[in-house]
Amino acid sequence: MSRPNSPTPQRSRPRRRRQLIRVTETVKSSTGFERFRRAMQGSGFSAVVSVAAHVLLLLLLTWFVVRGEGLLKAEPLDLRWLTAREVEEGQSARAPVRIASIPDGTPTVPVVPETPEPPMPARPARPAVQPVDVAGQLATRKPEKKRLLLQRIDEGGKSDLAVRSALGWFARQQLPTGNWRLHEGYPDAGRRTARTDTGATALALLSFLGAGFDHVSGEHQKTVAGGINWLVGQQRPDGNLFDIDEFGREETYYAHAMATIALCEAVALTADRRASQAATRAVKFLVASQQPIQGGWKYQPQTPLTNGDLSVTGWALMALHSARIAGIEVPGDAFLLASNFLDTVEIQDGARYRYEPEFPVTPAMTAEGLLCRQWLGWPRDHPQLENGVGYLLGPKHRPRWQDGRRNVYSWYYTAQVLHNMGGPEWEQWYRDARDQIASHQLRTGSVRRGSDVRGSWHPGQPIGQAAEKSDIAGRLYLTAMCVLVLETPYRHAGLYMPVDESEKGKPESGSTGKPDPKR
C-alpha cells in the first residue's frame, strides 16, 4: 500500500512539462506556418505579393477547369459563307448575325466612301510596222511637176533662186577628183577633227539630186557624175563608203548613210547599173551594222551590248527607204528593229523623242522621230503624230535666224514631217523658213577658189544652237542643209498625198517591207 505524499510523482511532473514544450516547439518549427511567419518577419511586402499572385493563379485555373466542361459540349464554329442553296433550305443557324452597337454617348463619324481613282488612260493603239508605199516618191523632181509646186508655195521664186545660187557655189568647190571636203577649200570650213570627204560629197550630191539634176543629163550632169564616180570608186569591199580608216569616228555612219541615200537616189533617177551595185553593197553593210535587238545605229557596227542614237538612226533609216525607192531589196526585219529603237527614245506614247533614252526631248529629235514613224506606216490622223506636229509648230520652235536659236538641222526634219502632213500650216511654216534662209544667203563677193562664198551661208553669223553643229562642220554643211530645206516641196512626194497612177510600177516601188523570216 503506497503512500499518498510520495516524492517520486512530484519530481516527474516538471520533467514531463519540459518534454511537452520541446515537442510542441519541434512541431511548430517543421510546419509551413512557421516558415510563413519567419518569411513575414524577414521580407514583409514581397511575401504578401507572392502569395497573392499564387492565389490568383489558382483561382483562374479553377475557373477554366469548371468552364471547360461546357465549352467542350458547344457546337464548333462554322466560318463558311452560306451558299444560296443553304439559305433556301433554311439553314440560317450559320448565317451571320448583325449585332447592333451599344450607344455609349460618343458621337459617331459618318463613313465617307473612298472616291475611286480615275482609270489610267488607254494607250493609243500602235499601228503595225508597215513601211509606206514609195511609188512615185521622186516624181515631183521632174521639171514640170517641180515648177507647178513652186508656183503654189514659192511666190516670187525666192526659194528657186536661192537653190540655184547655192548649187553654183557647190559646183565651184568640187575638186578635180570629183569629191568635196568639209574642212578646207573655202572660208569658214569645218574643223579638221570633223573631216570627211564622203560626208561632204554626199551632202553636195543630195543638193543636186534633190533639185532633179542627175549624172546622166541636165545642167549639172558633169558635176554630179564626178561625185557619183568618186563614191563608187572609193567604196570598200564590205560596202562601207566612209573615207577614213579610223574605227568609231563620229562621222562614220552619218557619212555612210548620206552617201547611201545619194547613190540610191541616183539609181532611182537613172537606173545606172554601176551605181546600183554600189548602192546594194552599201545597203547590205548598213543592215549588217544595225543593233540586233534594239535596232539603232551609231558610230560603229552595233552589237547586242551597244546602243544606237536617234540622230544616226534617222539617216540610216532614210537610207533604207531610199533603197526601196531604187528597187533594192531591204529585209523587213530591219524596219521592225528600227521601230523597236524608236520605242526606247520616245515619250508620251511617241509624241516626243530624245537623242538617247537619258537625254531631254528636243524639237530636232522629235521631228526626226516623227519622220521615221511616218515612213514606218503611222497614218496621218494618228493622235500622237498630230500631238507631235502641234509641238513642232509651237511659237518658240518657229524658224528664226538668230543667235542661239537657228537650228537648220532641226528645220530639215521638221520641214519633211510637215510637208507629209500637208495643209495650210505646212505652207505657212515653209514660207517662214524660206524667208529666214533666203534673206541670209550671201549673194555677192569673190568667186575665186579659196575665198568663194557667193551663194553659201555663213556658219557663224549668227551662232546657231549647239545641236546644229555648224560651228564644227562648217560652211559646206550649213549650205547643204539650207538647200535641202528649201527643196522640201518637191524633193519627195508627200507621204499622205495621192500618187499619180502613171508613176506606179516604176523602180521606186522597192520591197514591201514585210518581215524577213530568214533574218
Image: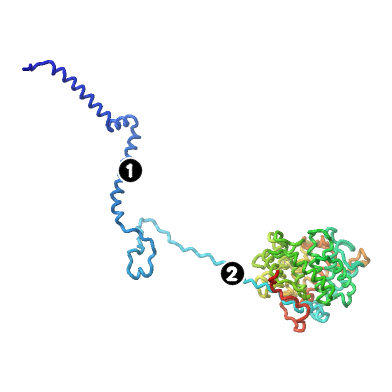
Instruction: Give the quadrant of the N terminus.
Output: top left
* Residue holding disc 2: 122
Instruction: Give the quadrant of the C terminus.
Output: bottom right
Q: Which three-letter amino acid code belongs to the residue tagged 2?
A: Ala
In terms of depth relative to the viewer, which is nearer, 461 or 328?
328
The quadrant holding residue 518 is bottom right
The quadrant holding residue 484 is bottom right
Disc 1 to disc 2, C-alpha distance: 66 Å
> Which residue: 38% across, 61% down?
79
In terms of depth relative to the viewer, which is nearer, 414 or 56?
56
> Which residue: 46% across, 63% down?
113
The quadrant holding residue 485 is bottom right
Q: Where is residue 507 in the image (x, y as percent from the top left)?
A: 78, 78
In terms of depth relative to the viewer, which is nearer, 36 or 304?
304
Above or below residue 38? Residue 254 is: below
Give the mark toward the camera: 1 or 2.
1
Find numbered disc 1 in the image and state the secondary structure of the residue it sits on.
Answer: helix
Query: Which badge, 1 or 2, comes first in the chain's sequence?
Result: 1
Asked whether disc 1 touches disc 2, contact meaning CB atoms under 8 Å apart, the reply is: no
Q: Where is residue 252 in the image (x, y as percent from the top left)?
A: 80, 62
Identity of the residue furthest to the front in this view: 518
Q: Where is residue 210 in the image (x, y as percent from the top left)?
A: 82, 74
Indicate which disc residue 504 carries.
Answer: none
Q: Where is residue 220 in the image (x, y as percent from the top left)?
A: 88, 74
Relative to 423, 213 lies left or right:
right
Badge count? 2
Q: Can residue 310 be seen in this view?
A: no
* Residue holding disc 1: 57
Find numbered disc 2 in the image and state the secondary structure of the residue it sits on.
Answer: loop
How crowded is the residue under tag 2: few (<14 C-alpha within 10 Å), some, or many (20+)? Answer: few
Q: Which three-letter amino acid code belongs to the residue tagged 1?
A: Leu
Above or below residue 269? Residue 258 is: above
